[in-house]
Image: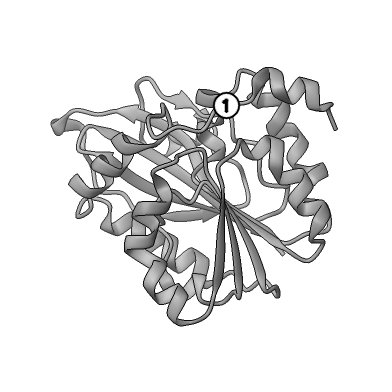
Amino acid sequence: MTSGHEYDAHRAAPSSLRRSGGLQWHFRALKHRRLHDPFRSAIAAFLQGWHPRASHLIIVGPSAGWFLPGPFLHLFSRLTLIDLDTSAPFFFALRHGRELERRGIKFEWRHADFVSCLPQLLHDDREAVVLFCNVLGQLGLERDDYEARLAQLPMWLADRAWASFHDRYSARVSKDERVDISSFTSHEPMDGGMLQRLGFSGEWTDHGTGDVLPVGVLRHYFPWYITPHRFHWIEAGAVI
């Protein structure tokens, strides 16, 4: 593990205006909520199939919980939510707060760079499980050392149940290029060759997450039009 000084050199600061989220993202999520419905349903089905035996869930990058189904959150008695977006608690409370409070589920926020605070949280609670919410593919927007930090995840998460859904590839598309494509699963990581076999061409942004999931874990691939002109392949997987 690197030293605290090295963490400080790269740490992103909490704010409501962010390159990878914040108020701009909340506006986009509201504006395109109907466009996002198929992806929202896909994530709900993925999480429904993950059954970690734990009472404490650490959620990294929950934002407002736009893609977190209530029934999944209600499986836990305690939630720790890590997000650099200081506006996230307000929108999260609008979507989930009342029902969580009604059920007596405790939830607390940490406005911090998860790279800096997650290792300590994991050390303090050996039984907690972790869910990364579309955050690992955005780490390159927040930290210039993101590749080294992604490489540290196996050490941090050793012998622990965790899951993630994250950007794998993205591209701009025109109205004429939009296609309907289904989700699928694979034990192989998505790469340029797989994109070509799926019939895609053109320029794609690789979000650097090809090695996030361990070898052998079943990978779910979900298509997501984040806007009418921006297409993402989302990779998801769970480690039991």
Characterize the local packing of mark 1: few (<14), some (14-19) or many (20 or more) Cα atoms within 10 angstroms: some
**Quarter in which the N terminus is drawn:** top right
Give the residue drawn at x 51%, y 66%: 47
Report whether residue 218 is seen: no
x and y percent of residue 109 in the render?
Answer: 55, 53
Q: Does residue 234 sit above or below 209 in this rendering?
A: below
Does residue 89 appear to the left or right of 9 in the view shown?
A: left
x and y percent of residue 49 in the render?
Answer: 55, 71
Q: Secondary structure at mark 1?
A: loop
x and y percent of residue 170 in the render?
Answer: 40, 31
Report whether residue 101 is seen: yes
- Using the rendered view, name the quadrant where residue 195 is placed: top left
Q: Does residue 182 sit above or below 106 in this rendering?
A: above
Residue that carries the numbered disc 1 in the rendered image: 12
x and y percent of residue 196 in the render?
Answer: 43, 31
Q: Does residue 128 sit above or below 149 in this rendering?
A: below
Q: Amino acid at mark 1?
A: Ala
Give the residue drawn at x 78%, y 46%: 120
Residue nearest the observer in this picture, 201 or 58: 58
- Using the rendered view, name the quadrant where residue 238 is placed: bottom right
Residue nearest the observer in this picture, 138 or 178: 138
Give the residue drawn at x 74%, y 33%: 151
The scheme the figure's colours follow is one colour
Does residue 140 appear to the left or right of 122 in the view shown?
A: left
Does residue 55 appear to the left or right of 44 in the view shown?
A: right
Give the residue drawn at x 31%, y 49%: 181
**Quarter in which the C terminus is drawn:** bottom right
Outermost residue toward the left in this view? 176
